[in-house]
Each structure stands twice: as structure tokens, then as C-alpha cells.
Image: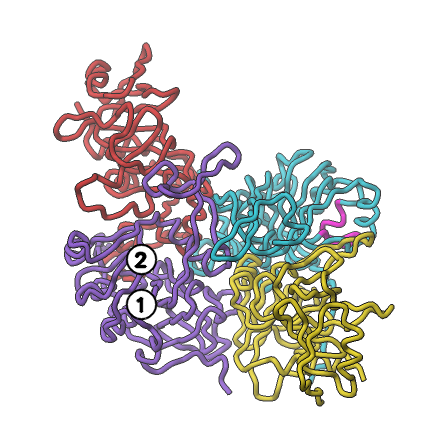
Chain colours: A purple, B cyan, C yellow, D red
Amino acid sequence: MSGFDKVVNSYEEALAGLEDNMTVIAGGFGLCGIPENLIQQIKVMGTKGLTIVSNNCGVDGFGLGVLLEDKQIRKMISSYVGENAMFEKQLLAGELEVELTPQGTLAEKMRAGGAGIPAFYTATGFGTPVAEGKEVREFNGRSYILEESITGDFAIVKGWKADRYGNVIYRDTAQNFNPLAATAGKITIVEVEEIVEPGKLQPAQIHTPGIYVDRLILGTFEKRIEQRTVRQSG
Amino acid sequence: MSGFDKVVNSYEEALAGLEDNMTVIAGGFGLCGIPENLIQQIKVMGTKGLTIVSNNCGVDGFGLGVLLEDKQIRKMISSYVGENAMFEKQLLAGELEVELTPQGTLAEKMRAGGAGIPAFYTATGFGTPVAEGKEVREFNGRSYILEESITGDFAIVKGWKADRYGNVIYRDTAQNFNPLAATAGKITIVEVEEIVEPGKLQPAQIHTPGIYVDRLILGTFEKRIEQRTVRQSG
Amino acid sequence: MALTREQMAMRVARELQDGYYVNLGIGIPTLVANFIPEGMEVMLQSENGLLGMGPFPTEEEIDADMINAGKQTVTAATGASIFSSAESFAMIRGGHVDLTVLGAFEVDTQGNIASWMIPGKLIKGMGGAMDLVAGADNIIVTMTHASKHGESKLLPKCSLPLTGAGCIRKVLTDLAYLEISNGAFVLKERAPGVSAEEIKEKTAGELVVPDFVPEMSF
Amino acid sequence: MALTREQMAMRVARELQDGYYVNLGIGIPTLVANFIPEGMEVMLQSENGLLGMGPFPTEEEIDADMINAGKQTVTAATGASIFSSAESFAMIRGGHVDLTVLGAFEVDTQGNIASWMIPGKLIKGMGGAMDLVAGADNIIVTMTHASKHGESKLLPKCSLPLTGAGCIRKVLTDLAYLEISNGAFVLKERAPGVSAEEIKEKTAGELVVPDFVPEMSF
């Protein structure tokens, strides 16, 4: 038996069960820490009508941007989008819906979704278009709005190292939304750069405990850089 | 200048400013990972009328139990108490108030307090005495109750290793409520077993970022064990 | 004959599946860990922040920083992870634990459970029990069918303050394994040598007895 | 003379204090990092999950996994910590950041700010701006006093959709440093050679001019 061996050996297997019109939560910030191969596999599968929950929508030809090419995305729930021409075109043509959500609220909605918290209050967005149609309530003399949590049919996540139990650690700022996405998928798939022997990861240093992870796959990554900024050395 | 040197050199200095009738949030679960020297210092100071937010209340003569001896605690907000005779005596005599809170709700209240979330919904406690006087609301056909966050005038925390910036890591299950308490104090004090050079702790492996920590002190710890359970070796 | 505590744990252990994340309460539920079938991997969650609880430590391994939710010294199993109490209850509340086993004073035909408070006695608190019953889809309550004084613990309506409302669907007592459905207990299995009639007599809440009720074997 | 972008950043930098945790927005706010007084320690928070942002990397150090909220490659300073987006915004929303500096299209006498959306133009999103203005106690808005077409950006009431309501108390423009109090802008400092009259003329919202308004010096 192999109940805790989460490793799958192909991206087909990793995304088995993904169907049209499902909701997919994706980790990553800009192009940093995005599950690039899992996104590519969704492109290969041609799944349509997807709702994608992700802070951004990639760029033309990379990251979630590739899912725009064949119009696979019906709706984006994001804090910042439109770094690609295709996105703008589909939005203006009414082929794409966007639900803009403040970045911190988006992160908290994913965490809440994974944590069994159906809704929470936040001051973020009070008095702005984000508050439209949402309950306002005062606590200690300040106004807050009610925000509901998000869960997905699938979560796609990019980790650094993992063991077969699905325990994952992230590397530097490639962590971002990934551990939150991992908690909020009915089926959570993590692709990583290295699969290590069980016991190699310190238990108290694991970012995503294996209980959240359903499938784990070893990948290779391009890791494209969006804004290459350098200083002179020496 | 030394803006990020959070280290103080005495427990007097660590708890300077603590006054009667304040609220103190304490990390620890049972006797594991409790800020034992900070608690002892509160006993020495003789501060009275305290509201203590902590999962448990120690035992007779150790942990938060020592604050019962001189009746320094007015109210406990806890999930499980009364492992000591003094506690029961003061409770029955009406000298001590207890607000019992489910363990997960207590943890989430501390996190929410630190995270600027004034309140959240949870199914925990719906239909039980815990729900009395609280709003009930349905989300997706299930009933939840509204729980408000907790913050404290002080938070007292036990860490393992820290650097002078106040970045902290915890050891094994001595983590428990400590990182949550650390976020929820107006003034957060952490006592640790070792202060390491800045840069020694891996940035992505820090449990409590220094932004939450106001004062840091090096201590020595008894680490009493509540239930000593062993198996035969070999 | 009524089941022993060990037999109760053995029966519960049959509900385990390979790859299950399980939270075991104090008492009989803890014993379930001793009956995990050979070759099956199960991970035990301890709500103080440990997923992958191992055996008790040897004298040499004992460590005050490694305890379980019962405050006993434990070890971490291979593949374990350790985290804060907020993360631990995020797991529990979020429904990520596959099976929760816990004791109770009373259960009723509406799936209510009372397990933490007897008015008039000192109230120590609910600990994590309210989160566990609210968060889990799959809960097995283990308790004796009746109190020492012979009063049924399977009621039409709990008399004690609740731990959770409408959240229990499976009960294992020393006499029977029952499921709760449509406002009644349904008798699914009998302890060896215990008749459906005896169980009916000791069940205060409505009991549905199917035509055939298998007897447990050990 | 109106302040240059660098002078604006220099003026903002005078609000820094040793030991401050600071979040700097894109544009002029980013430049503030270049004017941290010698010997003063300040930690920069980047909302994608980095506290303790260091300088840009050298060509050799460049690392795709190390970026800031502007998606630029960066390094981590000594004492840095790295965490999830939820933790990052817990810090921000929870009011743990000492100073937030960000740009805007408009600010009004009620402390409202509009900085993310111009109806009719493509809306890219608010990113973390709404969380930043809602979470911080101490915010400095930096922007030009008037638009390129000469229209004042300091208004009686914002005309654009808001980023946050009632949360701004300090504004630094290329002409003046102002505070918002009791439903008016209060002129606290003038850019060198800029008169209070000129500032009054270019301020659409009510402006209170104290008897003495010091001139900034650089």
C-alpha cells in the first residue's frame, strides 16, 4: 500500500479530472513561483470555461497568459491583471470576465477557504467599488466589509522541495500565494524542483504539510524574469 | 543607532510598562513552550487584575499557575483550565472569571487580532453554549457563528532561537500558540534559548518575523513535563 | 457480551483506510493507534500542532518540546510536520482530516453530541473538541452504550450542553455500531452475543433495526 | 520651484525613524530608499512576502525566485524574513508597518484617496494598494500637486473611484507638504520659492494656511 505516496509521474496524471467550467486556484506572484508546467498542461488539455483564481494572469506566451490564447479562461479573480495584450483584447471583447480583489483580501480568502472560515471582515476596500453589494459592519468604531472565502476544484502550486508525503517547502519569494492556494483546492497538485527522501525536511520547517497535497510531480522550470533589475557589482 | 536591536538584558526591562488590569496573551500549550521566566517576572512584579489569554493556566506552582498564588489573575480566556487545585478554589470562590473558548477559535482569534481581521465566522460552537449571544449566519446552507478577534496590551512568547532583529523560530511542538500570540500584542516580548547572529536564520524559515517583536530576552528554561510517557527502548 | 475497550478500538480501526489522516481523542480513541492494520499507513494528527505522531519516546528520547494534545511526551513519525495551533485548526476546521474518533457523554438522533460539560461539576473546558466535531465530515463517537447506572447515552435529545449540533453520523458503543440517519439510530452491527432486542432496550432514542444485523467478529 | 522627484523622495525620507518598517510603493516612493540617512536602520517591506528588502542584485546574484512587489529582481538584507502573501498582508492589515508611502491620482479633504482606476481606461487592478491604505496608521501620499493639464489633485471630494476612505492624513506634492485635518488641507511646508498663494491657487480643496509656513530646504 502507498497511501502517502503522492508522487505522480506525468502531467496528464497530475491534472486528471480537470473539466470544463471548473475553478482553479493558482499560486505565484507575477511570473515568480508559478506552476508553469501545470499551466502548460491545462493548455494541452484544452479545458475551457475556467475560472482562475490567481493574483496575476501571466504575460503573453508565458504563465497563465498561455491559457488566453485558446480562450480557455472565462473568469479571472485577481488583484492585478492585464500585463499582456491578449488579456486586454479579450476583456474589451467581452470574452473574459474579471473580478478584481485587493491582494491581501485575495490571500486571506484563499487561506479562509482552506481553513473552514466561510467569511471574515476587513477594512480593506471599505468605501471603494470593492465594497459594492457587501455588508458593512462597525467594530470598535471602524467600518469593515464582509468578504467570503474562496475554494477551488483544483489548486495548482509550485514548490521547491517536497517529500513523497507531500510536505513542501518554498524557495525565497517564490512562496507568495502558493501555500494558501495549496490549502484551498479540493484537489491540490504541487510541482517541485526536487523530491527528497522522507525525513530530510525538518518537520517544524515545512511550509505546506502533506495533508493539503493530493498529487506531487517533479518538474523542470524556466523561471522567466519579468523585471530584470541589477546593480553594478563590486 | 540600534533600531532593530530588540534585545533587552533583564526581565524587569522586558516587562516594563505592564500595569494592573491589562490583558496579556501568552503562548504555550499545557506546560510546553510557555514563557516561564516572563510569567515568573509578572509574579515578582505583583501586577493585579490581569486578563490572561492562554490555552491553559499551568499547574500549581508552575507556568501561569504561579500567578494564581497572589490572585493576580482576574480573568482567563482559555480552552482548557483547572489542572490545578488553586484554580478551582478561586473559581468556586468567585475570585476568578473564566471565558471558555474552543481551542481552534482561540488560536484563530489571536491570529485575526494580529492580522487586522476584527471578526470571522466559524461553525465551531454553533448550537452550543459557546454560541450564546453571538450572531448566527448561514453560508452555503450551513450555520456559522461570528467570533471577534483578540489583541493584548502585552504578548509573552517563548521561542527557541532568534536574532537581534526579533526574527524567531520555535522548536518542535513548543511552537503551538506562540507565533499567534506574538502577532497580537501591542507590545510583544519573546524569550528564547539562544540569540544567534543576524543572517544565521534562513529568511524563508523564520516562524515569527521581527516586525511583530518589540523586546527579546535570552533565558534559561526548566521545561517541566506534564505527562511523562515512555516506551521501552530497544 | 459487551465489547472490551480494546475490541472497541479494534472495531474502529476497521474504518481506517490507507493514507488516512486521523485525529484520535483521549481514552478509547487513543487505543485505535494500536490496531492499525499491518502494512497500512495512517498519519495521526495531534491538535497542538503535530501531523505524523509517532510512538512514545524512550527514556533517552524524551523531550519536553515534543508532546501531543493529551500533553504526553511523543515522537514525530517519518514524514511528520509541525506547525502552529492556528494552522492545526485550519486543517481541522477546513475538513482536511479524514477521520476523527472521540468519546462522548451523550449522542442523540439529530446527530448532536455532548461531551464536555456536566452542569454542577467543575467545567474544565472544551479544548479542541468543538472544533473537531464541527470540522470533520467523518466522525466516529466511541462510548459505552449506557452509563454505570444503566441510563442510555443514545437519546432522542441530548440533555447536557452540546459540543456540536447535527454533526455526528457514526457511533460505536460497547454493544453496537450504529449510524444516525433521518432522525433515528440505525443498528448496523451487534457486539458478539448481544441481541438486537437488548440494544433496543438500552437505546432511548428511536432505533431502526434492519432485517439482518450482522454480529461483529474479532 | 517645484520639487524634483528626488527632492520629493528626500523630503519623505525625513519622516523615517530608526527601526521603522516601511512599505514603499512604485514610482517616487521607491526612490525614498536612496535617501535613508546614514547610520539609520530601516526595513523595507515588500507585499509579495519579503521583509528586509536589499539592493538590486548584481548580474551574478540575480535570482528569479527573489523579486519585490514591483516584480523587480532584488536581494534580501541581513535580518530579512520571507513568508506567504497571507502573512505579508496580515502584517499590513494588522497595522504592523510603521510607514507606508504611495502615489495617488487624487486625495481629498476627507482623507479619501483615489489611485487605481480611471473609468474609461483599462483597469489593471488595485494590487495591494487598498490593503496598504486600510492597514497603515501612518501613510504619506506622494504625487504632483496638479495634473499635466493644471487640474488640482487635492480636492474637496475625489472624483475617481476610491482606493480607501478616510485614511490619508499626510500628502507630499511637488509644491508642498500638507496634512489633512478637520476636513481641510493644512499647509505645513512650502517647496523652496513657492508661495502659499500659489499653493492655495492650485489646491481645489479647502486649504488652511497657518501664519508661518516654513520653506523646505535641501
Q: Does residue D218 appear in this view?
A: yes
Q: Residue furthest top?
A: D211
* Residue drawn at 14 percent across, 26 percent down: D150
Relative to residue C13, is residue B118 depicted above or below? above
Residue B176 position, x and y percent, is: 59, 58
The foreground one among D139 and B145 is: B145
Q: Is residue C184 left or right of residue A50?
A: right
Q: Is residue A165 left or right of residue D168?
A: right
Q: How many marks?
A: 2
The region drawn magenta spans B57-67
Identified by mark 1, the residue type is Pro
Image-quadrant location for residue A68: bottom left
* Residue drawn at 57 percent across, 75 percent down: C43
Q: Residue furthest front?
A: C211
Relative to residue A155, is residue D175 depicted above or below? above
Instruction: Give the distance between the C-alpha atoms of the residues marked 1 and 2, in whole angstroms.
Output: 11 Å
Crowd around label 2: few <14 · some 14–19 · many ≥20 (10 Å): many
Image-quadrant location for residue C185: bottom right
Choose the circle earlier in sequence order: 1 or 2: 2
Residue B172 position, x and y percent, is: 58, 64
Query: In the rendered image, which residue does mark 2 sit on?
Result: A29
Query: In the rendered image, which residue does mark 1 sit on?
Result: A35
Residue A94 position, x and y percent, is: 19, 54
